[in-house]
Image (cartoon, rainbow, N blue to C red):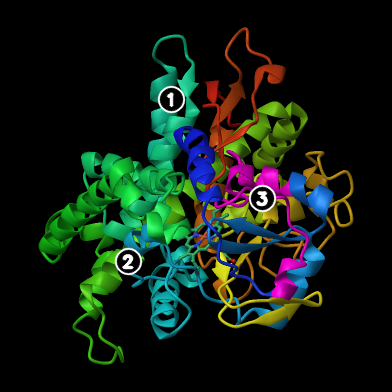
C-alpha cells in the first residue's frame, strides 16, 4: 500500500473512532476467524506491500479461512487448496462475478471487457471473442511466424547490447520490450511504432501501478472526495486520456495501415474486431467500447504477467547453474546444430517445460488471482457468507502448501516429472492461472511467448553474473502489488555459445 497512506490511515481512523460504525455483516459471518481490526479501516493496514505474504502469515495464526474487513469491504480469504476446491466446486457460479471498483471501471472501459465485467452475457461474449480471435491454441499456433521474428530481434538485441561497454546487459529491460513487442504486434498490428510500443509498455505498467493506488471510493464511499484531494482521480484520468488518444489513432488508421506496413499481419486482433463490427452474423452489437475493453485486457493482462514469468525464469536459471546446464544439454540434443530453436522442437524440451512450471509454482505472477464477489448468500465450511463478499484465493500460498508439495520452498523442477499436476485449473494446489469460469484464457498464448524465448536465449548464449557478483547477491524479493515482479533488475553477461 502507498506509504503516505499508511501514515494517513491511522489519523483518519482516529476521527472515525468517534463515529458509531454501522453493523454491516451478519452474525454468523462475524464468527469466522478474523484478525483484530482498527476502527473504520478494519484490516487494511495489515495487507502490507506484499499482501499474499501478509495474508499467508495471518493464516498461520487464524487458519485457512479468514474474514477481513477492508474499510467497508468484506473479504473472505482462502489460504488452503482444499477449501478453495470446496468453494469453486460448489459455488463457482455464485462467485463468478468481479467486484466493482473505480480503477477496474476504467480498465474495462466501463465493464465492456472480459477481466472485470460482471458475470453475464457481455462477459461471456467478450471471452468468446478473445478466445476465438487471439487466445485459442489454434490461433496461438498460427502466430508462430510473429513470435519467430520477434525472437530473432530479441537475440540480436542481446548480442548488440553485450557488444557494447563491459558486456553487462540489463536483461530485464530487453525481456520487457520483447514481450511488449510480440503482444502489441498481434493485438494492435505490426504497424505500431517503437514510440507507441514504449507507450503501451508504460500503460501496462501504469495499470499495474494503479492497483497500488488507493481509491477511497472503493473502501469508504462516503470519502470519495478524498480521491480528488489525494490526486488519485487525476492519475486515473491521465491514464484514460492516453489510452483514448491511442485508440482513436488506431481506429483512424485501420484499413489504411494494412495495405502499406501491415501486409504480413493484417489479421491483428483489434483489426479483426473492428471488421467484426460489420458482421451481421455476430448476434450482438460490438461497440467501440467493447473493442477498447477487450484490447486493454489483452495488453494489461498479457504483458506484465508474461514478462514477469520470463524474468523469474532467467533469474532462477542463473541462480541454479546445474539446472541451466540441464536446459542447455537438452537444447543441444534437439537442435542438431541449428542456430535457432523452432517451435516444432519445443515439444521435445521436457526439462525446460518442468522448469517453467516450477517457476510459476513459486513465483505466480498473480499471487492472489483476481478478486471475485459473491452474487448471493451462501455457506462455506458451515459459515454463512453474505452476498457481496469478496473472495480472495491465495494461490501463492497453495503453491507452497506442505500437505501437497514435498519440501515446498525448494526449487526442484524434477517434482513435475512423472506426475500429471498441471496449471490448467483442476489441481487446486497449483492454480497460477486461476480456476473455474474466470480462469485465465491466455495460458497457451503466454506459454508460447515464454518457451520460445527461453529456449533460444539459452541455446544461443552462455549466461553469467557480472564480475564481482555472486549468486548469493541475487535478491529474489518480489515487488509490485497485483503482479509479482522480481524487484531487482536482472543484469547478466551473455557470451555467444557454440551451437554445434
Ligand atoms: C504467465 C502469464 C499469465 C498468468 C500467470 C495469468 C494469470 C491470470 C489469473 C490468475 C487470472 C485470474 C483468474 C481467476 O480469477 O480465477 C487471469 C485472468 C485473465 N487473464 Fe491471465 N495470466 C497470464 C497471461 C495472460 C495473457 C497473455 C492474457 C491475454 C493476452 C491474459 C488474459 C486474461 C484475461 C482476459 C483474464 C480474465 C478472465 C475472466 O475474468 O474471465 N492472461 N490471468
User: Which of the labelled discs sits on residue 159, or is there none?
Assistant: 1
What percent of the width, then of the height, locates residue 119? 48, 79
Q: CA distance from mark 2 to mark 1?
A: 37 Å
Side (left or right) of 371 relative to 378: left
Q: For mark 3, does the 10 Å Cα neighbourhood hold few (<14), some (14 to 19), or many (20 or more) residues?
A: some
Q: Considering only vertical position in the picture, is 149 above or below 90? A: above
Side (left or right) of 85 relative to 467: right
- The segment highlighted magenta reads 27-56
Front label number (2 vs 1): 2
Is disc 3 in contact with disc 2, using a CB cutoff of under 8 Å? no
Is disc 1 in contact with disc 3, using a CB cutoff of under 8 Å? no
Q: Residue at x 43, y 25 (%)?
A: 159
Side (left or right) of 417 relative to 360: right
Is disc 2 in contact with disc 1, using a CB cutoff of under 8 Å? no
Residue 47 in the magenta stretch? The answer is yes
| Image quarter of the C terminus | top right
Query: Which is more N-terminal, label 3 or label 1?
Result: 3
What percent of the width, then of the height, locates residue 111? 36, 71
Q: How many marks?
A: 3
Query: Which is more N-terminal, label 2 or label 3?
Result: 3
Which one is in front, 476 or 499? 476
User: For disc 1, does the CB lie below 8 Å from ligand 1?
Assistant: no
* Residue matched to label 2: 293
Question: Disc 1 on helix, strand or loop?
Answer: helix
Amino acid at each position: 500500500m502507498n506509504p503516505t497512506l499508511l501514515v494517513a490511515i491511522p489519523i483518519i481512523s482516529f476521527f472515525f473512532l468517534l463515529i458509531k460504525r454501522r453493523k454491516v455483516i451478519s452474525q454468523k459471518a462475524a464468527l469466522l476467524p478474523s484478525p483484530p481490526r482498527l476502527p473504520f479501516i478494519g484490516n487494511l493496514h495489515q495487507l502490507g506491500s506484499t499482501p499474499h505474504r501478509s495474508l499467508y502469515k495471518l493464516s498461520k495464526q487464524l487458519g485457512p479461512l479468514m474474514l477481513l474487513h477492508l474499510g467497508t469491504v468484506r473479504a473472505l480469504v482462502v489460504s488452503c487448496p482444499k477449501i478453495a476446491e470446496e468453494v469453486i466446486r460448489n459455488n463457482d457460479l455464485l462467485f463468478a462475478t468481479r467486484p466493482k471498483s473505480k480503477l477496474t471501471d476504467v480498465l474495462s472501459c466501463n465493464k465492456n471487457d472480459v477481466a472485470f465485467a460482471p458475470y453475464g452475457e457481455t462477459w461471456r461474449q467478450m471471452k468468446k471473442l478473445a478466445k476465438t480471435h487471439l487466445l485459442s491454441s489454434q490461433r496461438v499456433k498460427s502466430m508462430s511466424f510473429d513470435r519467430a521474428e520477434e525472437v530473432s530481434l530479441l537475440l540480436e538485441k542481446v548480442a548488440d547490447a553485450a557488444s557494447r561497454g563491459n558486456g553487462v546487459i540489463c536483461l530485464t529491460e530487453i525481456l520487457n520490450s520483447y514481450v511488449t513487442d510480440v503482444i502489441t504486434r498481434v493485438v494492435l498490428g505490426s504497424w505500431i511504432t517503437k514510440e507507441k510500443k514504449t507507450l503501451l509498455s508504460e500503460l501496462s505498467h501504469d495499470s499495474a501501478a494503479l492497483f497500488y493506488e488507493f481509491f477511497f471510493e472503493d473502501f469508504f464511499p462516503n470519502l470519495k472526495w478524498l480521491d480528488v484531494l489525494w490526486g488519485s482521480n487525476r492519475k486515473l484520468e491521465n491514464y484514460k486520456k492516453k489510452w483514448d488518444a491511442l485508440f482513436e489513432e488506431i481506429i483512424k488508421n485501420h484499413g489504411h495501415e494494412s495495405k502499406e506496413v501491415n501486409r504480413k499481419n493484417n489479421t491483428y486482433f483489434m483489426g479483426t474486431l473492428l471488421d467484426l463490427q460489420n458482421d451481421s452474423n455476430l448476434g450482438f452489437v460490438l461497440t467501440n467500447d467493447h473493442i477498447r475493453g477487450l484490447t486493454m485486457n489483452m495488453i494489461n493482462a498479457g504483458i506484465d504477467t508474461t514478462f514477469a514469468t520470463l524474468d523469474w525464469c532467467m533469474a532462477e536459471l542463473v541462480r541454479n547453474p546445474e539446472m541451466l546446464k540441464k536446459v542447455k544439454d537438452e537444447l543441444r540434443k534437439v537442435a542438431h546444430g541449428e542456430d535457432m530453436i523452432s517451435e516444432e522442437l519445443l515439444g521435445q524440451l521436457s526439462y525446460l517445460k518442468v522448469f517453467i512450471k516450477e517457476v510459476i509454482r513459486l513465483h505466480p505472477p498473480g499471487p492472489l488471482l483476481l478478486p471475485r464477489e459473491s452474487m448471493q448468500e451462501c455457506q462455506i465450511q458451515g459459515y454463512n457468507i453474505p452476498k457481496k463478499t469478496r473472495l480472495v484465493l491465495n494461490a501463492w500460498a497453495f503453491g507452497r502448501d506442505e500437505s501437497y508439495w514435498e519440501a515446498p520452498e525448494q526449487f526442484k523442477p524434477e517434482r513435475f516429472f512423472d506426475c500429471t499436476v498441471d496449471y490448467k485449473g483442476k489441481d487446486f494446489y497449483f492454480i497460477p492461472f486461476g480456476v473455474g469460469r474466470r480462469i485465465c484464457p491466455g495460458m497457451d498464448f503466454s506459454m508460447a511467448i515464454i518457451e520460445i524465448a527461453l529456449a533460444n536465449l539459452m541455446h544461443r548464449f552462455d549466461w553469467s553474473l557480472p564480475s564481482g557478483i555472486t549468486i548469493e547477491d541475487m535478491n529474489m524479493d518480489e515487488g509490485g502489488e497485483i503482479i509479482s515482479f522480481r524487484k531487482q533488475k536482472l543484469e547478466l553477461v551473455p557470451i555467444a555459445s557454440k551451437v554445434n
